Amino acid sequence: MRGPEAEIELVTDGNVHLPGGTITATVRITARADLEEAECSVALFHVDRYRRSDSEGASWTQDSEGAVAGEYVYQGPMRAGQVVEAAAVLPVPRRIEPPEGPQDLVDERYPPAGDAADGDSYDVWIEPEERWGPPTSAGAGVGSEWFVRADVGGAGFPEPAQVPVIVLAPAIPAPDLPAARVGGGTPKAAISFFGLPRTSVRAGTAVRATVRVSAKEEFKARGVRVELVRRASIAAGGSTSVTRTVAATVDVSGQVVLAARRPKDLAFAIDVPADAGPSIVGEDYRIDWLLRAVVDRPLRRDEVWEQVIAVHTAP
């Protein structure tokens, strides 16, 4: 079988970028045969990657991808053995949350897109409402990913070349939400957190705070632990599916007797993994991080409360 009539090599000026920055991508095309017309595009894509499963245990990945910026970097004939090298400067969207209206997508770095674009430009393939995307945050349930793609169109040409890139999430204010109880039954204690940071926590650092356990009546516990949990929530068909993944655990108490109406304060520090994706909001999903306090009650329902925090990845 005859192979591709051209080879594509693609490199970028780094694999870590900030919202509002730019990515310079360089593509190198080598013709293996005489080509009457070669057309090469380089584009920045965002993809929402959903991990699906059914009741029988089968699982699969479903992607929703779209270009946010792109250029045609070469159009014309090529002789066998000829090498063409070209570069494209691709703006990374400033907008990282779903836009509420067209005014939220105004960005002077982008030319008109869709029906308003120049008919000979790559922008005809981009819808204006697609020029945004959450920062990179991979994990169970759903994730946000980015890549640069170089494509040479025409019969006999190779598969597109792709280079993954990471878009970092900037720091944000900490969520102003109280801890919430998880599970049924009659509450045996109220749990709260204090001393939490006022802004998001950077991945690769530690959260240092205090958890307060206020028993309603005296009971014994095998121990108290705090877990760091990634929660992915996906809205579909009028309902929301939630995937929780424990990323870290720390024991903050051994066996303890919790006296009625005498709050017990327990200091702790828990590490946020360096590869933890940030807190993000997508079009039909969100990824949150939680501190989960668990009072381990032998032969009884554990008392479990969760506190929403936020994680960022930018310096």
Image (tube, rainbow, N blue to C red):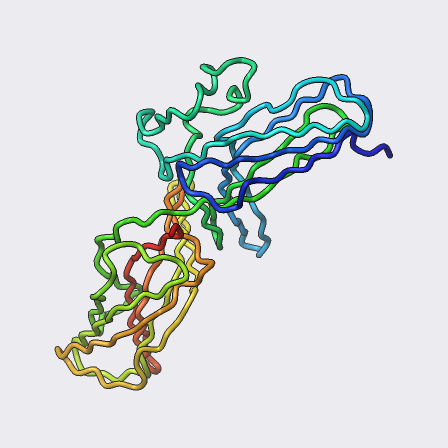
- Please report the residue visible at 35 percent of the width from the left and 55 percent of the height from the top: 311
Instruction: Please state if 221 lies on the left or on the right of 146 as rendered.
Output: left
Question: Which residue of the protein is positioned furthest toward the left in this rendering?
Answer: 261
Instruction: Where is residue 270? Give x, y as percent.
Output: 35, 69
Q: Quadrant of the N terminus?
A: top right
Q: How many marks?
A: 0
Above or below, 6 against 196 in this view is: above
Instruction: Please state if 206 lies on the left or on the right of 23 as rendered.
Output: left
- Please report the residue visible at 61 percent of the width from the left and 27 percent of the height from the top: 41
- Which is nearer the eye, 234 or 79? 79
- Which is nearer the eye, 207 or 84? 84
Above or below, 245 against 269 in this view is: above
Instruction: Where is residue 117? Give x, y as percent.
Output: 48, 16
- Please report the residue visible at 43 percent of the width from the left and 53 percent of the height from the top: 277
Instruction: Where is residue 110? Give x, y as percent.
Output: 43, 24
Determine which quarter of the picture holds residue 296. bottom left
Above or below, 215 against 184 in this view is: below
Question: Which residue of the protein is positioned furthest toward the right in this rendering?
Answer: 1
- Please report the residue visible at 28 percent of the width from the left and 61 percent of the height from the top: 307
Instruction: Where is residue 50? Give x, y as percent.
Output: 50, 46
